[in-house]
Image: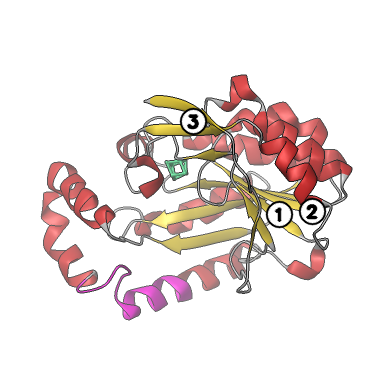
Amino acid sequence: MQYKQIKVNLLINKITKKDTLFAGNYTIDPYQNCEYGCLYCDSSLDKTIYIKTNAADILRKELKYLDQGIIIVGSVHDPYQKVEEQTKITRALLKIIEENNFACHILTKSNLIIRDIEILSKIKDCIVTLSLTSINNYISKIFEKNVPLPKTRLQTIEKLSKAGIKAGLADIPILPYITDEEVNDIIKSAKDYDAKYFLYKYLELKGNQKLCYFNILKNYYPTLIEKYQKLYHNSYFPDIKYISKIKNNIDKLCNIYGLENKILKEEI
Ligand code: SF4
Protein backbone atom coordinates (compact mmCIF):
# COMPACT_ATOMS: atom_id res chain seq x y z
CA MET A 1 0.00 0.00 0.00
CA GLN A 2 1.29 3.46 -0.90
CA TYR A 3 0.14 6.77 0.54
CA LYS A 4 0.19 10.08 -1.31
CA GLN A 5 -0.77 13.45 0.07
CA ILE A 6 -2.67 15.57 -2.40
CA LYS A 7 -4.37 18.96 -2.49
CA VAL A 8 -7.81 19.15 -4.06
CA ASN A 9 -9.69 22.07 -5.58
CA LEU A 10 -13.13 20.62 -4.91
CA LEU A 11 -14.42 18.26 -2.25
CA ILE A 12 -18.21 18.31 -2.33
CA ASN A 13 -20.12 16.54 -5.01
CA LYS A 14 -23.78 17.48 -5.39
CA ILE A 15 -26.16 14.55 -5.87
CA THR A 16 -28.44 15.36 -8.76
CA LYS A 17 -30.69 12.27 -8.70
CA LYS A 18 -32.74 11.53 -5.58
CA ASP A 19 -30.69 9.20 -3.39
CA THR A 20 -33.21 6.63 -2.20
CA LEU A 21 -30.67 4.36 -0.50
CA PHE A 22 -28.50 6.74 1.56
CA ALA A 23 -30.79 9.78 1.62
CA GLY A 24 -28.17 12.46 0.95
CA ASN A 25 -27.87 15.71 -1.02
CA TYR A 26 -24.08 15.92 -1.18
CA THR A 27 -21.13 13.54 -0.90
CA ILE A 28 -17.59 14.00 0.36
CA ASP A 29 -14.67 11.57 0.46
CA PRO A 30 -11.62 12.54 2.54
CA TYR A 31 -9.60 9.74 0.93
CA GLN A 32 -9.45 8.34 -2.55
CA ASN A 33 -9.25 4.52 -2.57
CA CYS A 34 -9.39 2.31 0.47
CA GLU A 35 -6.76 0.39 2.38
CA TYR A 36 -9.28 -2.07 3.83
CA GLY A 37 -9.13 -3.95 0.55
CA CYS A 38 -12.46 -5.79 0.62
CA LEU A 39 -12.38 -8.30 -2.20
CA TYR A 40 -15.76 -7.33 -3.67
CA CYS A 41 -14.98 -3.60 -3.81
CA ASP A 42 -13.47 -1.60 -6.65
CA SER A 43 -12.15 1.01 -4.17
CA SER A 44 -9.50 -1.53 -3.28
CA LEU A 45 -8.21 -2.23 -6.80
CA ASP A 46 -5.82 0.74 -6.74
CA LYS A 47 -3.15 0.28 -4.05
CA THR A 48 -2.40 3.99 -3.65
CA ILE A 49 -4.35 5.89 -1.01
CA TYR A 50 -4.64 9.59 -1.82
CA ILE A 51 -4.98 11.69 1.31
CA LYS A 52 -6.77 14.99 0.72
CA THR A 53 -4.74 17.10 3.13
CA ASN A 54 -6.56 20.38 2.45
CA ALA A 55 -10.04 18.81 2.58
CA ALA A 56 -11.12 20.81 5.65
CA ASP A 57 -10.15 24.19 4.12
CA ILE A 58 -11.99 23.38 0.91
CA LEU A 59 -15.11 22.15 2.72
CA ARG A 60 -15.25 25.30 4.85
CA LYS A 61 -15.21 27.45 1.68
CA GLU A 62 -17.68 25.27 -0.23
CA LEU A 63 -20.32 25.13 2.51
CA LYS A 64 -20.67 28.93 2.44
CA TYR A 65 -22.31 28.70 -0.98
CA LEU A 66 -24.53 25.64 -0.52
CA ASP A 67 -28.12 25.17 0.59
CA GLN A 68 -28.58 23.18 3.77
CA GLY A 69 -28.75 19.42 3.23
CA ILE A 70 -27.40 16.03 4.17
CA ILE A 71 -23.75 15.35 3.40
CA ILE A 72 -22.82 11.71 2.88
CA VAL A 73 -19.35 11.23 4.35
CA GLY A 74 -17.49 8.33 2.73
CA SER A 75 -19.78 7.72 -0.20
CA VAL A 76 -17.18 5.71 -2.12
CA HIS A 77 -14.16 5.13 0.15
CA ASP A 78 -14.21 4.46 3.89
CA PRO A 79 -13.68 7.73 5.83
CA TYR A 80 -12.46 5.78 8.86
CA GLN A 81 -9.87 3.64 7.16
CA LYS A 82 -6.68 3.11 9.22
CA VAL A 83 -4.82 6.19 7.99
CA GLU A 84 -7.52 8.36 9.60
CA GLU A 85 -6.11 7.40 13.01
CA GLN A 86 -3.15 9.71 12.29
CA THR A 87 -4.47 12.26 9.80
CA LYS A 88 -7.81 13.03 11.56
CA ILE A 89 -9.12 14.54 8.32
CA THR A 90 -12.60 13.02 8.69
CA ARG A 91 -12.73 14.33 12.24
CA ALA A 92 -11.88 17.86 11.01
CA LEU A 93 -14.56 17.63 8.31
CA LEU A 94 -17.20 16.61 10.85
CA LYS A 95 -16.36 19.61 13.03
CA ILE A 96 -16.90 21.89 10.03
CA ILE A 97 -20.21 20.17 9.22
CA GLU A 98 -21.29 20.77 12.79
CA GLU A 99 -20.19 24.42 12.85
CA ASN A 100 -22.12 25.07 9.63
CA ASN A 101 -25.27 23.34 10.83
CA PHE A 102 -25.40 20.76 8.03
CA ALA A 103 -26.73 17.22 8.52
CA CYS A 104 -24.62 14.20 7.67
CA HIS A 105 -24.77 10.50 7.00
CA ILE A 106 -21.50 8.66 7.60
CA LEU A 107 -20.82 5.30 5.96
CA THR A 108 -18.11 3.11 7.44
CA LYS A 109 -17.00 -0.36 8.46
CA SER A 110 -14.79 0.84 11.29
CA ASN A 111 -15.18 1.22 15.04
CA LEU A 112 -12.72 4.14 14.83
CA ILE A 113 -15.82 6.30 14.46
CA ILE A 114 -16.35 5.92 18.23
CA ARG A 115 -13.33 8.21 18.72
CA ASP A 116 -15.43 11.08 17.32
CA ILE A 117 -18.65 10.34 19.17
CA GLU A 118 -18.60 13.71 20.95
CA ILE A 119 -18.55 15.59 17.64
CA LEU A 120 -21.24 13.34 16.16
CA SER A 121 -23.58 14.07 19.01
CA LYS A 122 -23.25 17.82 18.39
CA ILE A 123 -24.11 17.62 14.68
CA LYS A 124 -27.64 18.82 13.94
CA ASP A 125 -28.78 15.52 12.38
CA CYS A 126 -26.21 12.79 12.27
CA ILE A 127 -26.80 9.30 10.93
CA VAL A 128 -24.19 6.54 10.89
CA THR A 129 -24.41 3.37 8.85
CA LEU A 130 -22.07 0.47 9.58
CA SER A 131 -21.88 -2.05 6.78
CA LEU A 132 -21.10 -5.73 6.73
CA THR A 133 -21.61 -8.55 4.29
CA SER A 134 -21.64 -11.49 6.68
CA ILE A 135 -21.76 -12.19 10.40
CA ASN A 136 -19.83 -15.39 9.81
CA ASN A 137 -16.19 -14.66 10.74
CA TYR A 138 -14.87 -17.18 8.22
CA ILE A 139 -16.68 -15.55 5.29
CA SER A 140 -15.87 -12.07 6.56
CA LYS A 141 -12.18 -12.95 6.77
CA ILE A 142 -12.21 -14.08 3.13
CA PHE A 143 -13.86 -10.97 1.77
CA GLU A 144 -13.07 -8.26 4.34
CA LYS A 145 -9.91 -9.45 5.98
CA ASN A 146 -8.59 -6.05 7.09
CA VAL A 147 -11.84 -4.71 8.46
CA PRO A 148 -12.91 -4.97 12.14
CA LEU A 149 -14.82 -8.19 12.85
CA PRO A 150 -18.60 -8.25 12.26
CA LYS A 151 -19.26 -8.34 16.00
CA THR A 152 -17.10 -5.23 16.52
CA ARG A 153 -19.17 -3.43 13.90
CA LEU A 154 -22.42 -4.50 15.54
CA GLN A 155 -21.10 -3.31 18.91
CA THR A 156 -20.23 0.01 17.29
CA ILE A 157 -23.87 0.42 16.25
CA GLU A 158 -24.91 -0.34 19.82
CA LYS A 159 -22.50 2.27 21.27
CA LEU A 160 -23.67 4.93 18.82
CA SER A 161 -27.32 4.19 19.57
CA LYS A 162 -26.63 4.38 23.29
CA ALA A 163 -25.11 7.82 22.75
CA GLY A 164 -28.33 8.93 21.03
CA ILE A 165 -26.94 8.87 17.48
CA LYS A 166 -29.15 7.36 14.82
CA ALA A 167 -27.23 4.28 13.70
CA GLY A 168 -28.14 1.48 11.33
CA LEU A 169 -26.78 -1.54 9.55
CA ALA A 170 -26.23 -2.03 5.83
CA ASP A 171 -25.96 -5.54 4.45
CA ILE A 172 -23.88 -4.44 1.47
CA PRO A 173 -23.14 -6.24 -0.69
CA ILE A 174 -25.27 -9.35 -0.42
CA LEU A 175 -23.15 -12.04 -2.07
CA PRO A 176 -25.40 -14.42 -4.01
CA TYR A 177 -25.33 -18.04 -2.81
CA ILE A 178 -22.70 -17.09 -0.18
CA THR A 179 -24.30 -14.63 2.24
CA ASP A 180 -27.91 -14.39 1.04
CA GLU A 181 -28.86 -17.28 3.33
CA GLU A 182 -27.69 -15.18 6.30
CA VAL A 183 -30.11 -12.32 5.78
CA ASN A 184 -32.41 -13.46 8.58
CA ASP A 185 -29.53 -13.68 11.08
CA ILE A 186 -28.11 -10.33 9.98
CA ILE A 187 -31.44 -8.53 10.39
CA LYS A 188 -31.93 -10.18 13.77
CA SER A 189 -28.44 -9.04 14.82
CA ALA A 190 -29.23 -5.52 13.64
CA LYS A 191 -32.24 -5.51 15.94
CA ASP A 192 -30.32 -7.10 18.85
CA TYR A 193 -27.60 -4.43 18.62
CA ASP A 194 -30.12 -1.60 18.51
CA ALA A 195 -29.82 -0.59 14.85
CA LYS A 196 -32.55 1.84 13.92
CA TYR A 197 -32.78 0.74 10.28
CA PHE A 198 -31.53 -1.89 7.86
CA LEU A 199 -30.26 -1.17 4.35
CA TYR A 200 -29.10 -3.60 1.71
CA LYS A 201 -27.79 -3.90 -1.80
CA TYR A 202 -26.86 -6.93 -3.82
CA LEU A 203 -23.41 -7.38 -5.34
CA GLU A 204 -22.72 -5.43 -8.53
CA LEU A 205 -19.86 -6.49 -10.75
CA LYS A 206 -18.81 -3.55 -12.91
CA GLY A 207 -15.82 -3.47 -15.28
CA ASN A 208 -12.66 -5.11 -13.92
CA GLN A 209 -14.47 -6.08 -10.76
CA LYS A 210 -16.22 -8.94 -12.57
CA LEU A 211 -12.95 -10.61 -13.52
CA CYS A 212 -11.49 -10.09 -10.01
CA TYR A 213 -14.57 -11.51 -8.36
CA PHE A 214 -14.63 -14.58 -10.60
CA ASN A 215 -10.99 -15.22 -9.62
CA ILE A 216 -12.04 -15.16 -5.96
CA LEU A 217 -14.80 -17.65 -6.71
CA LYS A 218 -12.25 -19.84 -8.46
CA ASN A 219 -10.15 -19.91 -5.27
CA TYR A 220 -12.82 -20.18 -2.60
CA TYR A 221 -16.12 -21.21 -4.18
CA PRO A 222 -15.35 -22.96 -7.50
CA THR A 223 -18.67 -24.80 -7.50
CA LEU A 224 -20.53 -21.47 -7.69
CA ILE A 225 -18.93 -20.20 -10.90
CA GLU A 226 -21.57 -21.62 -13.21
CA LYS A 227 -24.41 -20.27 -11.07
CA TYR A 228 -22.83 -16.80 -11.08
CA GLN A 229 -22.36 -16.92 -14.85
CA LYS A 230 -26.09 -17.50 -15.20
CA LEU A 231 -27.01 -14.91 -12.57
CA TYR A 232 -24.81 -12.13 -14.03
CA HIS A 233 -25.29 -13.10 -17.65
CA ASN A 234 -24.44 -10.03 -19.78
CA SER A 235 -24.97 -7.65 -16.89
CA TYR A 236 -23.27 -6.12 -13.87
CA PHE A 237 -26.24 -6.81 -11.63
CA PRO A 238 -27.98 -10.11 -10.91
CA ASP A 239 -31.05 -11.44 -12.64
CA ILE A 240 -34.21 -9.45 -11.85
CA LYS A 241 -35.97 -12.51 -10.39
CA TYR A 242 -33.15 -12.91 -7.88
CA ILE A 243 -33.35 -9.21 -6.97
CA SER A 244 -37.07 -9.33 -6.31
CA LYS A 245 -36.78 -12.56 -4.29
CA ILE A 246 -34.20 -10.86 -2.04
CA LYS A 247 -36.33 -7.73 -1.75
CA ASN A 248 -39.49 -9.63 -0.80
CA ASN A 249 -37.62 -11.67 1.79
CA ILE A 250 -36.03 -8.58 3.36
CA ASP A 251 -39.31 -6.65 3.42
CA LYS A 252 -40.89 -9.58 5.23
CA LEU A 253 -38.03 -9.99 7.73
CA CYS A 254 -37.82 -6.27 8.52
CA ASN A 255 -41.50 -6.39 9.26
CA ILE A 256 -41.10 -9.37 11.57
CA TYR A 257 -38.20 -7.77 13.48
CA GLY A 258 -39.74 -4.30 13.48
CA LEU A 259 -36.91 -2.57 11.59
CA GLU A 260 -37.23 0.18 8.98
CA ASN A 261 -35.65 -0.89 5.70
CA LYS A 262 -34.92 2.64 4.60
CA ILE A 263 -33.74 5.89 6.11
CA LEU A 264 -36.80 8.03 6.38
CA LYS A 265 -35.86 11.45 5.11
CA GLU A 266 -38.68 13.16 6.94
CA GLU A 267 -37.19 12.00 10.26
CA ILE A 268 -33.90 13.88 9.80
S1 SF4 B 1 -14.20 -0.64 3.53
FE1 SF4 B 1 -15.71 -0.03 2.01
S2 SF4 B 1 -14.60 1.29 0.59
FE2 SF4 B 1 -13.07 0.15 1.77
S3 SF4 B 1 -12.57 -1.61 0.50
FE3 SF4 B 1 -14.17 -2.22 1.96
S4 SF4 B 1 -16.11 -1.91 0.86
FE4 SF4 B 1 -14.52 -0.78 -0.26
Ligand 1, image quadrant it occupies: top left
Across and down, in percent, residue 6 comes to 54, 32
Q: Residues within 10 Å of mark 3 (few under 14, many from 20)?
A: some
Instruction: Measure the alpha-carbon separation of dots 1 and 3.
Output: 25 Å
Looking at the image, do the residues carrying marks 1 and 2 touch, with CB atoms under 8 Å apart?
yes
- At 63% from the left and 54% from the top, the residue drawn is 27
Front residue of 82/176: it is 82
Magenta stretch holds residue 109: no
Magenta stretch holds residue 239: yes
Mark 3: amino acid: Pro
Q: Which residues are magenta?
A: 233-248
Mark 2: amino acid: Ala
Front residue of 6/146: it is 6
- At 38% from the left and 35% from the top, the residue drawn is 137
Image side of residue 152 versus residue 237, left or right: right
Helix, strand or loop under label 1: strand
In the rendered image, the residue lying farthest to the top is 86
Q: Is residue 164 visible?
A: no
- At 33% from the left and 74% from the top, the residue drawn is 242
Q: Which residue is mark 3?
A: 148
